[in-house]
Image (cartoon, rainbow, N blue to C red):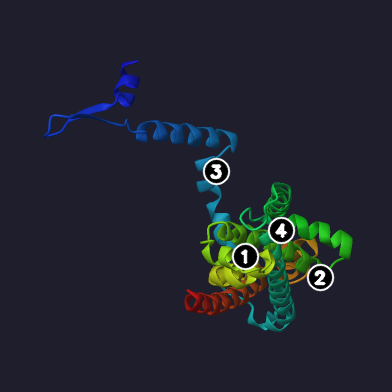
């Protein structure tokens, strides 16, 4: 009881004027205690064992060692799947970002004064964003068959929900002055949106779309595990055959590709900002 009182008792300070003020009790100690308890609980639930980690760490180096000696002769076999990965990442990201804009308009409560429509579109964004891309790719392969098209659909769904959510949140925080002025001049809400709100949010929207594309190139590389085409097929195949030299070459090419795309994307984002 005394510890509780010491932690939560408001501290009294007397100003030079003689006025007494009370400092709010700090929550640092309770938060640290909660973090410690959750850490202990997580260790027990996950059966984390430091001894097992130390004992089996050599297996990690047994895999990494050949990866750092990539098989360069495997390069010609990587080019086609690498371009498939880039193409489905770009197309899925582009289509998702384009379609996200009108749906973000519907989700914004300062654009569409209908709570039902706002709620339905926001719920759609939440549901699609909750489904992992790997799961949506697996579902797409059952519907559209194996190949890059299924991966494109999966990336499209994620991009649509990701860009859409961030865009409608940006729309809801913009200054409504220009929009209301156009409405008073006789413009429809849709036309006023595209003439006043879109130019204001465009740099943020394009920056978000570019950042989303960067991430999708990395995500697309693993979609082949469920038959969605791209580099994932090669990674899965060579890991199953324990050919880590080839895996190292695949990862090296993916690293170079992602590095180039990220630098190009970062350049354009700086220009937008």
Q: Which mark is residue 224?
A: none
Element carrying mark 3: helix
User: Dot 4 corresponds to which residue?
Assistant: 133
Residue 184 lies, in percent from the top left, at: 60, 65
Quick one: label 3, few (<14), some, or many (20+) residues within 10 Å?
A: few
Q: Earlier in the sequence, mark 2 or mark 3?
A: 3
Residue 217 seen in the figure: no
Q: Quadrant of residue 144?
A: bottom right
Q: Earlier in the sequence, mark 2 or mark 1?
A: 2
Residue at left offset 55%, top offset 40%? 48
Residue at left offset 32%, top offset 20%? 5
State the separation of the CA atoms marked 3 and 1: 66 Å
Q: Earlier in the sequence, mark 2 or mark 4?
A: 4
Q: In the shown orientation, is residue 201 left or right of residue 242?
A: left
User: Dot 1 corresponds to which residue?
Assistant: 183
Residue 250 lies, in percent from the top left, at: 65, 73
User: Dot 2 corresponds to which residue?
Assistant: 149
Depth check, front residue: 147 or 105: 105
State the separation of the CA atoms marked 2 and 1: 42 Å
Between tags 3 and 4, which lies in front? 4
Q: Earlier in the sequence, mark 3 or mark 1?
A: 3
Quick one: label 2, few (<14), some, or many (20+) residues within 10 Å?
A: many
Residue 242 lies, in percent from the top left, at: 70, 64
Residue placed farthest to the top in the image? Answer: 1
State the separation of the CA atoms marked 1 and 4: 40 Å
């Amino acid at each position: 009881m005394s510890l509780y009182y010491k932690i939560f008792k408001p501290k009294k300070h007397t100003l030079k004027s003689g006025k007494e003020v009370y400092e709010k009790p700090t929550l640092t100690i309770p938060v640290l205690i909660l973090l410690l308890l959750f850490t202990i609980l997580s260790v027990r639930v996950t059966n984390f064992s430091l001894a097992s980690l130390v004992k089996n760490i050599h297996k990690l180096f047994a895999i990494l060692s050949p990866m750092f000696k990539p098989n360069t002769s495997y390069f010609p076999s990587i080019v086609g799947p690498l371009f498939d990965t880039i193409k489905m990442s770009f197309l899925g990201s582009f289509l998702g970002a384009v379609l996200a804009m009108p749906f973000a308009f519907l989700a914004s409560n300062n654009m569409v004064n209908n709570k039902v429509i706002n709620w339905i579109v926001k719920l759609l964004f939440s549901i699609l964003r909750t489904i992992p891309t790997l799961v949506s790719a697996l579902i797409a392969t059952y519907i559209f068959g194996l190949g890059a098209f299924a991966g494109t659909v999966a990336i499209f769904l994620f991009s649509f929900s990701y860009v859409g959510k961030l865009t409608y949140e940006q729309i809801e925080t913009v200054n409504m002055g220009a929009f209301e002025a156009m409405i008073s001049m006789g413009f429809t809400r849709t036309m006023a949106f595209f003439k006043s709100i879109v130019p204001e949010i465009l740099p943020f929207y394009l920056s978000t779309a570019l950042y989303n594309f960067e991430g999708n190139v990395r995500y697309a590389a693993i979609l082949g595990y469920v038959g969605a085409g791209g580099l994932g097929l090669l990674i899965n195949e060579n890991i199953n055959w324990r050919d880590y030299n080839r895996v190292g070459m695949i990862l090296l090419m993916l690293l170079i590709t992602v590095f180039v795309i990220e630098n190009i994307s970062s350049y354009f984002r700086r220009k937008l900002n």
